[in-house]
Amino acid sequence: MSGRIYLLAAALLFSTGGVVIKATTMTSWQVASLRSLVAGLILLAILPESRRGWTWRTGLAGVAYAVTLVSFVVATKLTTGANAIYLQATGPLYLLVLGPVLLKERLRRADWWLGAAVAVGMVFFYLDPAVASGTAPDPAQGNWYGALSGLGWGITVACLRGAARAGGSSLGAVAVGNLMAFAAALPMAWPVKVLEAVDWLAVLYLGCIQIGLAYWCLTRGLAQVPAFTASALLLLEPALNPVWTGFFHGEVPSPYALVGGAIILAATFWNSATLRNS
């Protein structure tokens, strides 16, 4: 039970990223840079595993994760929280190619069905008329950044699996990826105006709690819970992200986003279930 609590806590903390990112007056590049700086330093400080086992594979996974981090923040600022998180969840689609090519992994029939379902769900986001609003000023462009975040996440997962096989550090890649994201977004973050107290609080929360504490909970939970149960519990993140942005910012996901997101989440859950039973 303690492992499940850790995973639910991690998913809950991860899910708050969208609502806090939207609450800041900073640009997306400023949020991405400062959040990742704080997160990278916190992870290195509180998780000893993140400081061990670095290889060139760690750096490669870090680059992909940095793309994921930055593009997700930009997507969240430009489109709705629902669109940003559901499009990031399309990462498994790209593993259909990356798994066999990079990892020499054989695909199951269920994996192809997952890829097809994710692709169908993804189409719904681009059928959406994409009406701009106060918290989603450019949803069309934001959706493309969300798709880039999904691609980055798919590559990240492939790189992490490759690193784990070679004895590398997955948590090291997360820490390195955050520091790379900080450096990559920093040039676009200038000039930085005088930040308000709410901005500093948001950055500290995002770095220390939404990423740092969440990964601490995640590592504890994964050590105690089977893979299927863990993947199912972590689906709480994309389920709750739109709830927080809706409650605090008044965002209402479009019917297209709700249908597309439901297809992606249901297909991911079903794929994990078939993997457990195979």
Image: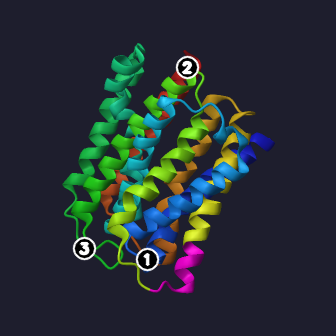
Tag 1 and tag 3, C-beta contact below 8 Å: no
| Quarter the N terminus occupies | top right
> Which residue appears at 48% of the width and 77% of the height?
23
| Residue picked out by circle 1 | 250
> Which residue appears at 25% of the width and 73% of the height?
132
| Residue picked out by circle 3 | 132
Note whether 21 is above or below 12 in the view shown. Answer: below
As measured in the structure, the alpha-carbon distance from the residue carrying label 2 to the one carrying label 1 is 44 Å
Q: Position of residue 6 (x, y in %)?
A: 73, 47
Q: Which portion, as a residue range, is magenta?
A: 194-202
| Residue picked out by circle 2 | 165
Q: Nearer the viewer, mark 3 or mark 2?
A: 2
* Nearer to us in this view, 196 or 141: 196
User: In this image, 126 relative to 186: left or right?
Assistant: left
> Which residue appears at 64% of the width and 34% of the height?
229
User: In this image, 182 relative to 146: left or right?
Assistant: right
* Nearer to us in this view, 202 or 124: 202
Q: Where is residue 95 in the image (x, y as percent from the top left)?
A: 37, 29
Note whether 85 is above or below 2 in the view shown. Answer: below
Query: Callout 2: few (<14), some (14-19), or many (20+) C-alpha neighbours within 10 Å?
Result: few
> Which residue appears at 47% of the width and 41% of the height?
62
| Type of amino acid under label 2 | Arg
As measured in the structure, the alpha-carbon distance from the residue carrying label 1 to the one carrying label 3 is 14 Å
Q: Position of residue 139 (x, y in %)?
A: 26, 65
Note whether 172 is above or below 179 in the view shown. Answer: above
| Quarter the C terminus occupies | top right
